[in-house]
Image (cartoon, coloured by chain):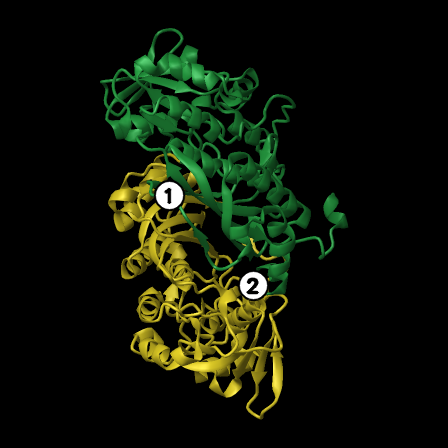
Chain colours: A green, B yellow
Amino acid sequence: MKNDHTSNNDIILMGHGGGGLLTNKIIDEIILNELGNPILAKLDDGACITVPQQELVMTTDSYVINPIFFPGGDIGGLAVCGTVNDLAMQGAEPKYMSLALIIEEGLPLSDLRRIIRSIKNTSVETGVLIVTGDTKVIEKCKRGLHEHTEKDRSASPENSGIFINTTGIGLKLPGVNTAVSNARPGDSVIITGSMGDHGMAIMNIREGLNLESGLISDVAPLWSMINSLLNDIPGIHCLRDPTRGGVAAALCDVAKTSSCGIMINESSLPVKNTVRGACDILGLDPLNVANEGKAIIICRNQDEEKTLQIIKKHNLGRDACVIGKVTDEPAGTVLLKTRIGGERIIDVPTGETLPRIC
Amino acid sequence: MKNDHTSNNDIILMGHGGGGLLTNKIIDEIILNELGNPILAKLDDGACITVPQQELVMTTDSYVINPIFFPGGDIGGLAVCGTVNDLAMQGAEPKYMSLALIIEEGLPLSDLRRIIRSIKNTSVETGVLIVTGDTKVIEKCKRGLHEHTEKDRSASPENSGIFINTTGIGLKLPGVNTAVSNARPGDSVIITGSMGDHGMAIMNIREGLNLESGLISDVAPLWSMINSLLNDIPGIHCLRDPTRGGVAAALCDVAKTSSCGIMINESSLPVKNTVRGACDILGLDPLNVANEGKAIIICRNQDEEKTLQIIKKHNLGRDACVIGKVTDEPAGTVLLKTRIGGERIIDVPTGETLPRIC
């Protein structure tokens, strides 16, 4: 265990959250060192930003994922991608972001450095500027209301963690309205790639499945791809990223909010073999499993082909496909046409399939 | 113990964070029910907001205070006030706010309702609109890297808690620049009221002092008072709210960033007797203790009298007074002139005097 070598100089202490010299030290040496820009560097209690006379989109998300490092990513990159993607789904160019850290005492400084580095890389990739931030430290937690089972322990509940909030400001593209309430009967339902990759990558670690290959989070920033799409087809009806709750929850939300039905075809749903195998072991439906680098696109039927063309040109969208269509009836309901021709209602799950997935 | 009567229907469960029906239930019944407005009600993953062509200020803060209810307030009102005050210190009218909750499983729903009610009341009072939000649930924590002492237990580390992030967007008043780098030699240093009230109210509970009277948090939104001031005197040099780290940390920040000295007079520092008494018991200096409803105002000497006049008209500023002045030398240093005529350097503390104070 690397913790054997960890001294008090190498970990987060309660004092790092006191607002004194120790706080300044991690802000200067770890955070500003990586993320510094002229606005953030002023370090006032707020950042002055200027925006053109344009509609803005504001979105917030806290990231509490456990474990904080996982195949394909970490909580830092996820915290940038998740918020950038929420802006992208509103048709907004990610512009400014705040970054608030709640760190458990005991977190190795090397972990914090790695997370901040990942935040930097993802924010540079997406062109979003981190302009203001906050750092708090909380006492180390022993998590769990109930006794931990051996399985839980594999997720290292005793390791110190971090919670991250990012709040993003984006510039809404003029003339674009991709709200979940805009689906219309006859529209095509497209997904930009395979389902369930993020959730099953986390589940593989958390449930101790020890499946070695192929279970890798799809976490990725979608703005560049979505921007190309909206530039060519500003009349896209809805965009939604199927994160917590998976594709099922996202589609149910669209059906309910747009007062229409949605019919999806089981045989069209793209799921990697490794993901399907892991889902089978755990008795999960890939439709309910979280994604962090996929979008559901709902467009007029006549825009379907062009949409696929544009999306497939992007690395993140090369497996895009049509999975179903919007229908008149039954309003508010998502139906799955099974491989053998039957129909099944797709419901929003009551509680969690997997907590702390994002 | 009220927990004896608490069933699974009355507390937050992990499933409330799963993004399914249980999540929708608390969002609809508890959050939207109180905080609903046309923008928030759309419940898309981001909020569309429009702002005039004006410089914006963006600020973020996470609130991890323990206990979550305290004399004079609670974490909900604090989370609104703290962020509103950060905007006010930048000369910005609080306009829009995001609200992200990280809730520990086991939190009584009645506690959540009380916190959301407090958020509503404070946001209405300050005119800030909550436009977007996020809700996550984490496993219950047993806090503390070390064994708990009897004293710690009085702060109920075993009760479930909540962390709140608020990110605010404000409209900067034209022609105003109150950055901490703007102090000039000869300026007057004013505080809008007594020091240390918030910190000692928390300390009284956490340290089990059991001092019955007078230790009440000063948590309050300052925009209305600051707005009056800046409308009359847009040339105010600096504004800073002395929260974590107290007046000492705030003044050290001004001195360092403005490259000037600050001399404050011990005999001018306003401290309530109850606060001073509690500080004496714990060996604390009120200069280092957090405030949540006070501002430090640095203005040109010729504006001093008018500033006091305007501030004292407000309920929150009626005890405002001059506590010192900005000097040429020694640059970057805050000096205290003691009652007996000596001088003492005021330093930023290294670590925490009290963790999780805000």
Q: Is residue B10 above or below residue B84?
A: above
Q: In the rendered structure, find residue A184 and report the number of the disc placed on it.
A: none
Taking the image as shown, residue A238 lies to the left or right of residue B259, namely left
- Which of the 4 image quadrants contains residue A13? bottom right
Measuring 50% from the left and 20% from the top, which residue is drawn there? Answer: A314
Residue bearing mark 1: A52
Q: Name the side, left or right, on which B143 lies relative to B45.
A: right
Q: Where is the N terminus of chain B found, in terms of image quarters?
A: bottom left
- Residue at left offset 40%, top offset 8%: A339
Q: Secondary structure at mark 1?
A: loop
Count neighbours of disc 2 (C-alpha within 10 A) and say few if under 14, some if 14 to 19, many if 20 or more: many
- x and y percentages locating residue A49 in the rendered image: 43, 50
Q: Nearer the viewer, residue B263 or B237?
A: B237
Q: Which residue is mark 2?
A: A19
In this orientation, which residue lies closer to the viewer: A104 or B144? Answer: A104
Chain under disc 1 = A
Q: Are marks 1 and 2 on the same chain?
A: yes
> SS for tag 2?
loop
The answer to whether residue A99 of the structure is visible from this angle is no
Left or right: residue B150 versus residue B176 is right
Q: Amino acid at mark 2?
A: Gly
Q: Is residue B279 left or right of residue A323?
A: right
Q: Quadrant of residue A301?
A: top left
Relative height, residue B38 to residue B295 (above, below): above
Label 2: chain letter: A
In the displayed structure, A266 sits above or below B25; it is above
Where's residue B220, x and y in %?
36, 67
Q: Residue at x 49, y 62 (%)?
A: B156
Among the two numbered marks 1 and 2 on one chain, the one whose residue lies closer to the N terminus: 2
Question: Could you tell me the amino acid type at mark 1?
Answer: Pro
- The residue shown at (60%, 71%) is B332
